[in-house]
Image (tube, grey):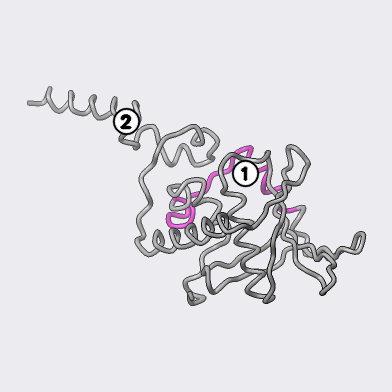
Amino acid sequence: MYAESDFIALSALQHYVFCPRQCGLIHLEQVWSENLYTAEGRTMHERADSAETSYRQGVKVTRSVALRSLALGVSGIADVVEWHRHKDGFKPFPVEYKRGKPKKHDADKVQLCAQAMCLEEMRSCKISAGALFYGQTMRRLDVAFDDSLRSKTIAAATGIHELFLSGITPSPEYGQKCKLCSLIDHCLPQVLDKKSSASRYVQKLCYELSEDEL
């Protein structure tokens, strides 16, 4: 169990699974930069986070729901929580809004699963599934909260707590996903990643300059 003073933001889970360095830059170094993708995502969340309650076809829809979990040590806001009627009462069904389309990695799913685990702890219930709504496809992706995804979510939360405790932003690992990151100009993965060709070129150039000075 974590103390409230040690809570991390739910959004940090998505950042950490996508890239631990991005998580460190945003949450440790307070670095942020807007690009087309983040602007679209922010607009989508502003629409979802109206704090209104509505009803449709027997489903109660609540927005901007405050969440927390002592077990994970996280807190934050759920975009939407639907309350579906079952034989034994209403059960929560979290829905997270994302720009773009479904991704190959599990970053969005882990964030959603963490929301479900918060609701389970707060409401003393079991949640088997939720959904991710993507702005580009305008469709929902149903997500099952199975043991594998729950394990990834716990591991991500643990990893972030360890990262924050160390206070050290991880080194970059340059890859295809870097091109989509709004922090690429702050991160400089091609230069700082020791395995990248750009980094090797810079190291070679520095070595040659130092040789000339001898």
Q: Secondary structure at mark 2?
A: helix
Q: Residue furthest right?
A: 57
Judge from the rendering whether residue 34 lies leftward or rightward of residue 61; answer left or right.
left
Residue 68 at what x, y percent from top left?
A: 60, 71
Front residue of 175 and 147:
147
Mark 1, Cα crowd under 10 Å, few <14 / some 14-19 / many 20+, is some
Magenta includes 43?
A: yes
Part of the protein shown in magenta? 25-46
Judge from the rendering whether residue 204 lies leftward or rightward of residue 158; answer left or right.
left
Judge from the rendering whether residue 82 lies leftward or rightward of residue 16; answer left or right.
right
Inspect the image, locate mark 1, and give the three-letter code of the amino acid beneath it.
Thr
The residue drawn where x is 48% and y is 74% is: 2
Residue 55 at what x, y percent from top left?
A: 89, 63
Instruction: Find residue 132 and name its label.
Output: none
Front residue of 201 and 85:
85
Q: Which residue is mark 2?
A: 199
Residue 59 occupies quadrant:
bottom right
Residue 134 at what x, y percent from top left?
A: 72, 44
Inspect the image, locate mark 2, and give the three-letter code of the amino acid beneath it.
Ser
Magenta includes 120?
A: no
The residue drawn where x is 71% and y is 57% is: 130
Q: Which residue is mark 1?
A: 38
Magenta stretch, main secondary structure, is helix
Residue 92 at what x, y percent from top left?
A: 75, 66
Q: Secondary structure at mark 1?
A: helix
Q: Residue furthest left?
A: 214
- Along the polypeptide, which appears first: circle 1 or circle 2? 1
Is 167 situated above or below 137? below
**Whole-Å distance between the Cαs marked 1 and 2?**
28 Å
Name the quadrant of the C terminus. top left
Is 2 situated above or below 204? below
The residue drawn where x is 58% and y is 39% is: 104
